Every structure is written in structure tokens, then in C-alpha cells.
Image: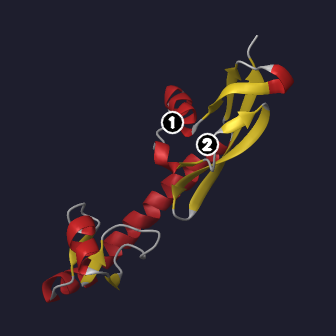
Amino acid sequence: MKIILTKDLENLGKAGALVEVKPGYGRNYLLPRGMAVAATAKNIRQLDHEKAGILSRASKHRANMDAQAKKLASVELRFARKVGEQDKLFGSVTSKDIHEQLAAQGYEVDRKQIHLPEPLKILGTHEVEVKLHPDVAAKLKVTIAAET
């Protein structure tokens, strides 16, 4: 099934690209979510006409994400957790905890954008990647200290 992407998708391509996907993926996932439109002759002509607008919106979005990444790079989150013997944490710091603290500070980041291979369970400072855009990622500093 041929479709035209309306949004940048990491594994498929950029907005405005004409791609071939399996029919079920296109019909059941991409089309209902507005991530793509069917590649009919009319839509292909319209795509050629609107391609400049799509590319300019994508570049503006990327510029906004670059600016947000610079702001996030200066943020340092601090967590106080209970600690047992040998400085082992009771529990951990998860992407949900990081998301909640970022939201409390006024940063709009989706929880799925916070890439944490596994929850943080060690005291100290850690770097956490926040993937804001397929081409833009920010590094957050997360400090975990013992609760007093």
C-alpha cells in the first residue's frame, strides 16, 4: 500500500515522503491517526503543491525542539530517596518520576520521550536522554541523594 506521510516517523521517513507499507499497518494505524494519507493521484498532486508548507512546518517544529533541548540541558533534577545499607535505594527513580518533576517545573515533555533503559537505583548524578524529535535529543542531569 502506498501512502504519503504527514508527520515525520522515525522508521518510515520524513513528512511528505511517498512510502510503501503493509496494508494493515497503513489502514489500521497510520491513516486513522492522521500520520499519513492514501497515495491517490489527487493526493500526490496536492502533496506536490503543499510540500513547501509541510517542509517549513517541519523545520519550525525542529527549531522549537532545538530551543527546548537547550533549555532542558540546563535543568538538573534532584530526588531524595530512602537508602538502606551500603547506599542501596529503597525503590528507584523512574521515567514517571522525572516526567512529574519536569511538569512541575513547567516543561511539557511526554513520558515516552524520556529514554531510561532501566530505573535509576544508585545514588549520584546520572544523565538521562530526552528524545524530543527524531533528530533532537537533550541530556538531563538527574541527581539522587539520600533522604535525611
Residue type for callout 2 = Lys
Closer to the observer: label 2 or label 1?
Answer: 1
Estimate the spatial distance between the alpha carbons at disc 2 and disc 1, rounded to whole Å.
9 Å
In front of the other: 120 or 141: 120
The reply to whether dot 2 and dot 1 touch (C-beta < 8 Å) is: yes
In front of the other: 78 or 92: 92
Count of marks, rendered view: 2
Q: Is residue 91 left or right of residue 88?
A: left
Residue type for callout 1 = Tyr
**Disc 2 crowd, CA 10 A, few/some/many (<14, 14-19, 20+):** few
* Quarter occupied by the N terminus: bottom left
User: Residue, x 57% and y 55% (percent of image)?
Assistant: 66
**Image location of residue 50, percent across then percent down:** 26, 76
Give the secondary structure at mark 2: helix
In front of the other: 122 or 58: 122
Q: Earlier in the sequence, mark 2 or mark 1?
A: 2
User: Vertically, is 132 above or below 86?
Assistant: below
User: Vertically, is 145 above or below 66?
Assistant: above
* Quarter occupied by the C terminus: top right
Colour style of the rendered protein structure: secondary structure
Q: Spot the residue most to the left.
A: 42
User: Residue, x 69% and y 21% (percent of image)?
Assistant: 81
**Image location of residue 123, percent across then percent down:** 78, 30
**Image location of residue 27, percent across then percent down:** 20, 72
Residue assigned mark 1: 107
In front of the other: 118 or 143: 118
Q: Give me the disc on residue 71.
A: 2
Q: Is residue 122 left or right of residue 62?
A: right
Q: Is residue 23 left or right of residue 109?
A: left
